[in-house]
Image: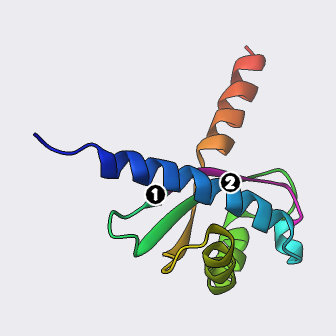
Amino acid sequence: MPKKGPSKNISRLNEDIRRELIDIMGGMKDPRLKDGLLTITRVDTTSDLSLCRVHVSVLGGQTDADAVVKALNAAAGHVRSVIATRMHIRRAPQFQFIPDGSAAYAAHISEVLSHL
């Protein structure tokens, strides 16, 4: 019978990383991150903890999602070191930030439905 512990642990780790990332991003000084609403929609960490894909969504503001993702990927090393310190883990995963258009799509659908 397969173990279910590791997947539960990864899910818990993903949620902990998500919570820490929200706090870290709130304190970042990059102006591209201050314009609009930045949301972390999903965090996926590989089972060997080598990579963490963070899906982000940007609503409103003048900065597009690609510029925000570029800024976050440029700061990925800093984010990794802060996560390692805060979460007291020996080896923090590498972070890869990916744009997620699902929130923008949902807002668009809501707007279309309101006009019907």
Total label count? 2
Q: Which residue position is annotated with label 2?
A: 19
Q: Which residue position is annotated with label 1?
A: 44
The residue lying at 73 percent from left, 69 percent from top is 68
The residue lying at 85 percent from left, 56 percent from top is 36
Q: In front of the other: label 1 or label 2?
A: 2
The crowd level at tag 2 (other Cα within 10 Å; few <14, some 14-19, many 20+) is few
In reply to whether residue 5 is colored magenta, the answer given is no
Say which quarter of the image contains residue 38.
bottom right
Highlighted range, magenta: 34-43
Left or right of residue 73: residue 1: left
The kind of residue on which mark 2 rests is Arg
x, y percent for residue 82? 69, 78
Earlier residue among tags 1 and 2: 2
Say which quarter of the image contains residue 62.
bottom right
Say which quarter of the image contains residue 77.
bottom right
Q: Main secondary structure of the magenta part?
A: strand
The residue lying at 65 percent from left, 34 percent from top is 106
Q: Say whether residue 69 is visible.
A: yes
x, y percent for residue 85? 66, 77
The kind of residue on which mark 1 rests is Asp
